[in-house]
Amino acid sequence: MKNVYFLITLFVLVLAGNVSAQSKEDIVYLNNGSILRGKIIENVKGVKTTIEIIGHNIIVVPDSVIKMILMDQATLGKDHENIASPIEMAASVNFYGGSQNSGGFTFITAYSFPFRLSVGGGIGIEWFDHQQIPFIAEVKYSFLKGSFSPFVYALGGYAVPLSQKADTDWTEYHGGPLAGTGAGLRFNFTRRNALVFNIGYRYQKTKTVTNSYPWMSSQAYETYRYDKFNRLTFTFGFLFN
């Protein structure tokens, strides 16, 4: 676990050093698709943003027409410039606490609306009492438009076992519903990439079917066990579009 945290810290420091070594600019994205590049000289939250663009021209933009603001972004040449997409993809590593430690990996693709709401779905692999594949629908709301923003999220879905059969032929694993909610922070280190950290709650239900005395058909019967997992979850992810 210490090695994982060390690699994460090293990754963040390398990215920060790489970005700081480049020329910087502030970028204002408007709801109509226009992009303003330059230096923000005033930002009154909820009212207006004043930016100085090329040629020392000063533009005052009302907050109502602004989609997103990114500060201190690396200056890109025109040959390398590309337009940010509303489609975002996030790969995340999840750590689940509780009486039994467990974890997983998820990949979610989402559509980000101009009003800072995103809706998406994805798939992954997780470990509770056995391995399973979760199918997830997620809703997320970001509070700020800039390169740093807190957010809240909610998710739901259904998980199926990676393997239905246990080590014994008379035990079968079945899936169950899942749900979760929480809050986190998003850090944009480039125009198209961000690091995401969040903490929250995760619920998972599973079913186990056991066939007792399978070799004696006259006395065979099935027993059902339902397990409910309530876990505190910590997630580290990488988002790109």
Image (spheres, rainbow, N blue to C red):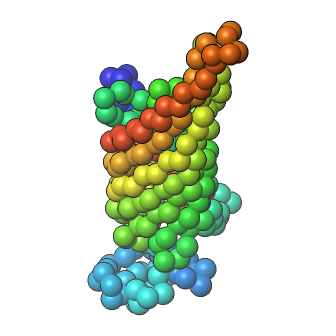
Residue at 61% from the left image edge and 23% from the top image edge: 221
Q: Residue furthest front?
A: 218
Up-down relation of residue 201 to residue 73 (above or below): above
Query: In the image, residue 210 lies at what x, y percent?
Result: 57, 23
Q: Is residue 193 visible?
A: no
- Find residue 72 and report its horizontal and vertical position in percent: 40, 62
Q: Residue at x 59, y 60 (%)?
A: 120
Above or below, 55 relative to 101 = below
Q: Nearer the viewer, residue 19 or 190?
A: 190
Name which residue lies at 42% across and 52% down. 180
Location of residue 148 (image quadrant): bottom left
Quadrant of the image containing the N terminus: top left
Residue 240 versus residue 199: which sits nearer the camera?
199
Quadrant of the image containing the C terminus: bottom right
Give the quarter of the image for residue 7. Answer: top left
Q: Is residue 35 above or below residue 70?
A: below
Q: Is residue 141 left or right of residue 35?
A: left
Residue under the point 37% across and 27% down: 101
User: Can residue 43 be spotted in the picture?
Assistant: yes
Depth check: give the residue in front, 60 or 119: 119
| 6 on left or right of 18 | left
Q: Is residue 236 above or below residue 44?
A: above
Location of residue 179 in the rendering, given as x and y in whole percent from the top left corner: 46, 51
Q: Position of residue 229 (x, y in %)?
A: 40, 38
Q: How many marks?
A: 0
